[in-house]
Amino acid sequence: MANKKVRVALIGSGSIATHRHAPEYAAHPDVEIVAFVDRYPERAEKLAAKYGGKALSKYEDALALDIDAVSVCVPNAFHAPITIAALNAGKHTLCEKPMATSDEEARAMIAASEKAGKFLMIGHNQRLMPLHVKAKQLLEDGVIGKVITFRTSFSHPGPETWSIEGSTGWFFDRKQAFVGSMGDLGVHKADLLRFLLGEEIVEAAAMVGHLYKPMGDVDDNAVCILRTASGGFGTLTSSWTHNPGEDNTTTLYGSKGILRLGSNPDYSVVVELATGEKQYYKVGKMQTNESGGQSDSGVINAFINSIQTSTPPTISGEEGRRALAVILACLKSNDTKAFATVEI
């Protein structure tokens, strides 16, 4: 017996909706796209013409439709109010990252989800990538022993190369974006580290600043030192001035060896053991903006599966809140010029 179609609306019709949410929903056999929403009507109309459904300019009109779920793909400052409205309207909600601009907002979103009895999922796709799933398995198997230190980086030339609005877009406007490279890229890596290490990051020291980009008033680079609950530490960097190309790599240094992720062009997972043995795994390349973002992120499939099976999403609102907490601690450290506790 075929599954009942999950009826969805996409709130926000910019690049993340165009390149990720819309095509992935459209490719899912159990999804019907009912509406696209955008404050610029022509964007919603373009996607509706391609995938079907209504084109709307107000999210409230979408929430009044007979739909089961929404994707919130709007500027960061609007994540919380629109997500809370969607949950209050009884819709399962997938919200892009960073989930909110403060811990208070994040908690309010989680509370709305619990009150409504509807799922809240955050779009942290890094932990769903095949190379990171494989890395998690290797770490749980103890292949490199206890992780002692680590380094992770997410860097590219900047959102103007990919965003629908280019160099004049909301990514560079603090009122709409809240943060720059740390919200666009760093929060992904904060979530990934928590996933891979299986423990919380509890302390941060960071330099977060606007170093080069001629436009905007948000950070375009950040270098952070993070300490885990078990005492290990390492670095997280994010950058919008990595030109050309991307650096989306992670290296974990353990008591028995090293685990390298995304740095080898042929093998996305490489293990180098202290014994001299090397293991190579070809488990899929990193999803990149350079490829147009067209490869499957896994996020939409996970969201729809949660709805269909009535299973809470693994990338829950609480997971999103804890990744956001790392970013907030880094910002606090930069402002105070001191170590900051991650408030979880």
Image: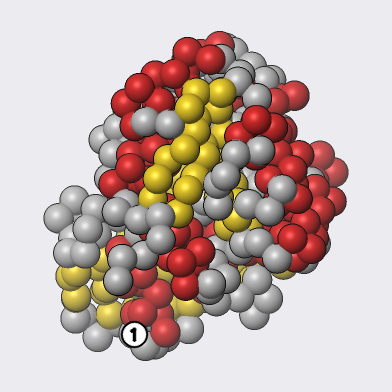
Position of residue 296 measured from the top left corner of the image (x, y, whole percent): 31, 49
Residue 75: quadrant of the picture: top right
**Identity of the residue drawn at 67% across and 20% down:** 173
Q: In which quadrant is the N terminus drawn? A: bottom left
Above or below residue 97? Residue 139 is: below
- Left or right: 97, with 52 as reference point: right
- Left or right: 166, with 265 as reference point: right
Q: Secondary structure at mark 1?
A: loop
Q: Amino acid at mark 1?
A: Val
**Identity of the residue drawn at 40% across and 45% down:** 32
Q: Residues within 10 Å of mark 1 (few under 14, many from 20)?
A: some
Which residue is disc 1 drawn over?
Answer: 143
Q: Nearer the viewer, residue 78 or 179?
A: 78
| Residue 114 visible in the displayed image | yes
Position of residue 315 measured from the top left corner of the image (x, y, whole percent): 55, 63
**Identity of the residue drawn at 37% across and 31% down:** 52
Position of residue 166 measured from the top left corner of the image (x, y, whole percent): 47, 15
